[in-house]
Image (spheres, rainbow, N blue to C red):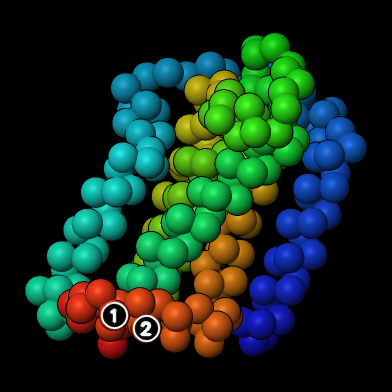
């Protein structure tokens, strides 16, 4: 199956999940899974979930950039796609949190103006930013080291599970985000012909050839 076809299938699945979330179709299964998931806040669970924090991903990106520069003296297209996917993915997460305003478990529902909801997006649950970042990383590493793809996706699932065990997300939050990660990366890859020339032009004008892609 071609990547473009995979992208459109994934788009359809994400739209279906979003519509189901919007109309409350996940409430029953979310409540059941939440009720049967023990609260586990051990240091191991916290350490796993913190490995997908925004701060951790800034460190990962810096390390990948350093690896690229050491290996070939410039930025690789795959790393650039990873960086853009992270930025785009987090933007999508924030907008969807503000649109849906789904409260986290044990939090009170809020109805805020959209701009205010954007500024307080972390209060809301849908979708999970940690899980989305982990899924973007898993997709990226699966492209770079395909032999170990199962390991990268096990990591993403562990992040999703840690969010459930900490009782900070619903099942639908992490399900959507596990699919949002690869969808975001695919979107960036499939639209390279549009944004890459613009990026390259800006890099040349700024004299930042070290950030020019291979």
Could you tell me which residue is drawn at 25 percent across and 74 percent down?
206
Horizontal relation, residue 91 to residue 204: left or right: right
Residue 81 quadrant: bottom left
In the picture as drawn, the residue positioned furthest to the left comes out as: 70
The answer to which of 121 and 149 lies nearer the viewer is 121
Q: Position of residue 20 (x, y in %)?
A: 85, 44
Residue 95 quadrant: top right
Horizontal relation, residue 184 to residue 68: left or right: right
The answer to whether residue 144 of the structure is visible from this angle is no
Q: Which residue is mark 2?
A: 201
Could you tell me which residue is drawn at 79 percent across and 64 percent down?
12
Q: Position of residue 97 (x, y in %)?
A: 65, 37
Q: Which mark is residue 205?
A: 1
SS at badge 1: helix
Q: Which mark is residue 149?
A: none
83, above or below 109, in the image: below
The answer to which of 8 and 194 lies nearer the viewer is 194
The answer to whether residue 11 of the structure is visible from this angle is yes
Horizontal relation, residue 190 to residue 96: left or right: left
Could you tell me which residue is drawn at 59 percent across and 45 percent down?
93
For disc 1, the neighbor class at 10 Å (few under 14, some 14 to 19, many from 20) is few
Quadrant assignment for the N terminus: bottom right
41, above or below 48, in the image: above
Q: Are marks 2 and 1 in contact (CB under 8 Å)?
A: yes
Could you tell me which residue is drawn at 24 percent across and 63 percent down?
64
Q: Position of residue 27 (x, y in %)?
A: 82, 29
Q: Position of residue 120 (x, y in %)?
A: 57, 26
120, above or below 3, in the image: above
The answer to which of 7 and 34 lies nearer the viewer is 7
For disc 2, the neighbor class at 10 Å (few under 14, some 14 to 19, many from 20) is few
Mark 2 → mark 1, Cα distance in angstroms: 6 Å
Horizontal relation, residue 190 to residue 41: left or right: right
């Amino acid at each position: 199956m071609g990547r473009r076809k995979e992208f459109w299938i994934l788009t359809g699945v994400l739209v279906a999940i979003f519509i189901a979330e919007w109309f409350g179709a996940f409430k029953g299964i979310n409540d059941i899974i939440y009720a049967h998931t023990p609260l586990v806040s051990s240091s191991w669970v916290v350490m796993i979930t913190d490995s997908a924090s925004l701060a951790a991903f800034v460190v990962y990106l810096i390390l990948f950039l350093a690896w690229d520069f050491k290996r070939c003296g410039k930025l690789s297209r795959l790393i650039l796609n990873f960086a853009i996917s992270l930025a785009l993915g987090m933007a999508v997460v924030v907008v969807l949190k503000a649109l849906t305003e789904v409260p986290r478990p044990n939090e009170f529902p809020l109805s805020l103006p959209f701009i205010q909801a954007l500024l307080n997006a972390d209060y809301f649950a849908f979708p999970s930013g940690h899980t989305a970042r982990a899924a973007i990383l898993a997709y990226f590493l699966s492209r770079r080291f395909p032999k170990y793809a199962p390991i990268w996706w096990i990591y993403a699932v562990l992040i999703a599970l840690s969010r459930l065990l900490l009782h900070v997300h619903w099942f639908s939050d992490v399900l959507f985000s596990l699919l949002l990660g690869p969808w975001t990366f695919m979107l960036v890859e499939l639209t390279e012909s549009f944004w890459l020339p613009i990026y390259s032009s800006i890099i040349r004008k700024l004299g930042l050839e070290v950030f020019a892609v291979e």
